[in-house]
Amino acid sequence: MAEREPRRVDRNRRQREIVRHLEDFPRQYAALETAMAAFGEDFDLQRFKEAFNTSEDMEAYNRVQAVERAVGRVQNFVAHLAVAGVKLAQLPAPPIGDEGSPGQQAFEALRDANVIDKTLCRRLTRAQRARSMIEHSYVQAPAGDVHRAARLVHDTARRFIGAYRGWVEAHLDPEPAHPQNAASSRARPTGSS
């Protein structure tokens, strides 16, 4: 059964979501970098572990929480952008496996469309699983795993955005049709008076 053409309203909504996420991504990524920098210029594993395992220094523990939150936020942005881009471009998506997710499915579709390479696809999938581990199995997640996840998300997100931005921009309308946009464009003067 062939995919039907998405309704214009759905296409416009998806485009607005993509544009908003791309505009806000630098702030979210900077928050991750700032949170990681609280543990030293090189994001020191030992300092992170000490703060992660403390039951007395709540300021240090809150810095760990900031890293975890930023990791989840950045990876959610990446997965959301991947899913929305695949839908916008109407790329064929492989079936979701038992352990898969819509994000992984979208990463694989982008790999199959040569938007990202297979190595980045694998690493994005690992980052997605790491985010899930942090958010859903936190009590059992060792400090070293969270530290590795932060480094992985930090690296893959930047690489993903670099490859994704140019590709998705070709699929965006110059200015998505939206009643507000149409009204404001009609209200703008078109010539000099």
Image (cartoon, rainbow, N blue to C red):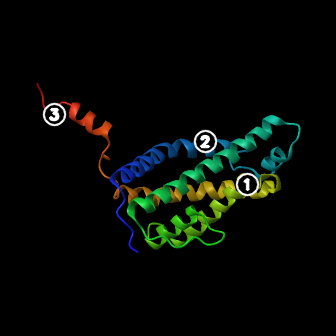
Label 2, label 3: how far apart the Cα atoms are:
41 Å
Residue 11: give x, y in percent of width and height. Answer: 37, 54
Q: Nearer the viewer, residue 141 or 29?
A: 141
Crowd around label 1: few <14 · some 14–19 · many ≥20 (10 Å): few
In terms of sequence position, does the residue under pointer 1 or pointer 3 come before the other?
Answer: 1
**Pointer 3 residue:** 190
Identify the residue at image location x=59%, y=50%.
74
Helix or strand or loop: what does disc 3 sit on? loop
Helix or strand or loop: what does disc 2 sit on? helix
* Front: mark 1 or 3: 1
Label 1, label 3: how far apart the Cα atoms are:
54 Å
**Pointer 2 residue:** 31
Label 1, label 2: how far apart the Cα atoms are:
22 Å
Residue that protrudes farthest toward the left in the picture: 193
* Front: mark 2 or 3: 3
**Pointer 1 residue:** 136
Residue type (three-letter) at the residue carrying disc 2: Ala
Residue 44: give x, y in percent of width and height. Answer: 75, 50
